[in-house]
Image (cartoon, coloured by chain):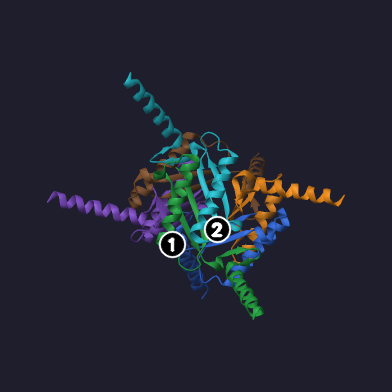
Chain colours: A orange, B brown, C purple, D blue, E cyan, F green
Amino acid sequence: MPYVNIRVTREGVITAAQKLELIQGTAELLERVLNKKPSSTFVVIDEVDTDNWGVGMESVTNLRRREAAGKSAADQDKK
Amino acid sequence: MPYVNIRVTREGVITAAQKLELIQGTAELLERVLNKKPSSTFVVIDEVDTDNWGVGMESVTNLRRREAAGKSAADQDKK
Amino acid sequence: MPYVNIRVTREGVITAAQKLELIQGTAELLERVLNKKPSSTFVVIDEVDTDNWGVGMESVTNLRRREAAGKSAADQDKK
Amino acid sequence: MPYVNIRVTREGVITAAQKLELIQGTAELLERVLNKKPSSTFVVIDEVDTDNWGVGMESVTNLRRREAAGKSAADQDKK
Amino acid sequence: MPYVNIRVTREGVITAAQKLELIQGTAELLERVLNKKPSSTFVVIDEVDTDNWGVGMESVTNLRRREAAGKSAADQDKK
Amino acid sequence: MPYVNIRVTREGVITAAQKLELIQGTAELLERVLNKKPSSTFVVIDEVDTDNWGVGMESVTNLRRREAAGKSAADQDKK
């Protein structure tokens, strides 16, 4: 009876179809590897604001901004 | 100093009074069974969207839809 | 289909009977308050070393030591 | 940068190879569905004692015992 | 590669700047104490409604109300 | 009344003194940034086996092995 908690940043919309794919993919994985019955696998998806998620001393909000800036700078350089 | 995390699907409204019952019932349970002081028991309730909770290869959203359909089909049969 | 995670310090032994009481008490509470079927309530108990649990700037290990010392000092005073 | 926590009961040994399959399967799933880079997906597996996991008002320890008894009773009946 | 989950009650607004301070302070702490690279430390902040957080048999909502009432009663007494 | 859960891989021994530093550093951080009283901040440290922690499609066990091999190969090259 596994419990799986998937935590991801909320960036754009995660559709109900994508969530279902995560739910099914997780249950299948646990059945394949550990022989757990899908009927007793719980999957809970938490979507977290990019301001509330940090990595490498910065928030994901800032990280994405910097990535976008870097990309647009790189685009500029090409011209 | 226990920490208890109650995660439930958000279906209809869970009232402040119901949340209080969960908080008090949990603190009482931990006092009764493990002699933990209620003043140092934290209870945190997470309400999770039914799209974000999966069981048995489907989301709770779909599960409830199917249950409702089954019920209304059964009601039809009775007539 | 609730998921409840009870985290407590590991102080002395928590018996299987006590764990069962926590499991049943939690499932009953969620049935009583939110009408959740006990058959789909998961309860997971985590026992945490007192060195690994902190409150008020100290570990529970130190807190218990200080409480015991205070108690024995109080016992001394009474004589 | 997803964080995935897989909690399962500790029944028999879960090998390092099986854990690796869970780690890789999870990272692949998140890449396929949400386009998350595997290099920034964390997977943490918690193995929980069967005494510490409850479902349907009983511990998994008791549930497994009852399942084994039911099975052996069924075997008896066949003779 | 630590994962740190900070759960606090949502009281007033927690600004992006404050969240960043928590993210950086946590990564620095883990680098200083355990020599963990900040680039592989994840920090996730969960803001929880005061109705959904209980301590000492009451919700934080009620606790804050009682504190405010006590304070205003004390102010009255002074006059 | 914050609850902070620090999850790290168990590599070598994390001493009680180091755990205390994490506990105090976390409580201080939350007091400084969000004005939370240290007396009501819980810090719980989970030490996780390197086999049970995955990042970038491999377990930390394998990652450390590869890092050590790379380092010893580099040392060889220098000679």
- The structure residue drawn at horizontal position 47% and vertical position 61%, both measured from the top left corner, is D60
Q: Is residue A15 visible?
A: no
User: What subunit carries mark 1?
Assistant: D
The residue that label 1 is drawn on is D51
Name the kind of residue labelled 2 in the image.
Pro
Indicate the secondary structure of the residue bearing disc 2: loop
Task: Give the residue furthest to the front.
Answer: F79
> On the same chain: label 1 and label 2?
no
Relative to F59, A71 lies left or right? right
The residue that label 2 is drawn on is E2
Name the kind of residue labelled 1 in the image.
Asp
Relative to E65, B68 lies left or right? right
Snapshot quadrant of residue E75: top left
Q: Position of residue C68 (x, y in %)?
A: 26, 54
User: What subunit carries mark 2?
Assistant: E
Relative to D44, F38 lies left or right? left
State the quadrant of the N terminus of chain A.
bottom right
Please tell me which residue lies in front, F77 or C25.
F77
Snapshot quadrant of residue C47: bottom left
Location of residue F59 with respect to D34 vertically, above or below: below
Q: From the viewer's perspective, is the residue at label 1 or at label 2 nearer?
A: 2
Task: Give the residue furthest to the left.
Answer: C79
